[in-house]
Image: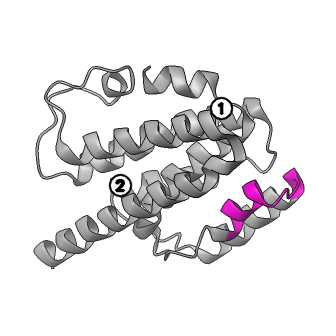
Amino acid sequence: MSLVELIAQADERGLAASGLACLDRCVPLLGGDDETLRPVWASLGDGAGAAEWGERLEQVRGKLDAAAGDEATALAHRMLQAAPAERSAARLRVWADACSVASLQIHRLLDTAADEASSVDSRREGRTDGMSPLVAAELRRQITVLEVLAGHGPAGLRRALEVSVEGRRVLRAVVSRRSRQQG
């Protein structure tokens, strides 16, 4: 099943986790650490209501660097700013879809290998020939998060977070290497 189809079929928790996971993997671009989004993740698993989700998002927005940066940083910042304070399936679906595109585009921008596709949309629809390694790994992570949550419900949140942490470490290494090469 393609990523587009998985997002279309996901429930509210799956959509929230999908968007949050994309943002979490890109948080190094915003100056965040491994704990930055932990309270928002916790709101998905501890039975916190939608109001707490919104409050925790606002706290995170206040902590992360809003400084101007390159295109990848701007995309990550837009993901954070677009996160809906209201945790409804309709709003989360739009956000999760936008986060999926933005995160794949960020990985495409940061990958030193060329991606043969003209846009990330074809990747999300399942056409993966000639995909660059960093984009391929991000696509797999996005699919895994949605599949785990669809198959295991709330119990899948731990695995979704593990997938996100792995991706965040990879992106942090890419950003660090890029910074050393440019600096």
122 or 80, nearer to the observer: 122
- In the drawing, does residue 103 fall left or right of residue 151? left
Residue 63 visible (yes or no): yes
Quadrant of the snapshot with the C terminus: bottom left
Query: What amino acid type is highlighted by mark number 1?
Result: Arg
Can you tell which quarter of the image residue 171 is in? bottom left
Residue 116 at x, y percent in the picture: 14, 29
For the residue labelled by badge 1, is the local secondary structure a helix, a strand or a loop?
helix
Q: Would residue 95 be found to the left or right of residue 13 on screen?
A: left
Residue 45 on the magenta span: yes
Residue at x 79% of width, y 44% of height: 87
* The image quarter in which residue 136 lies: top left
Q: Which residue is mark 1?
A: 93
The residue located at (51%, 43%) in the rendering is 145
Mark drawn on residue 72: 2
Q: The magenta stretch spans which residues?
A: 39-51
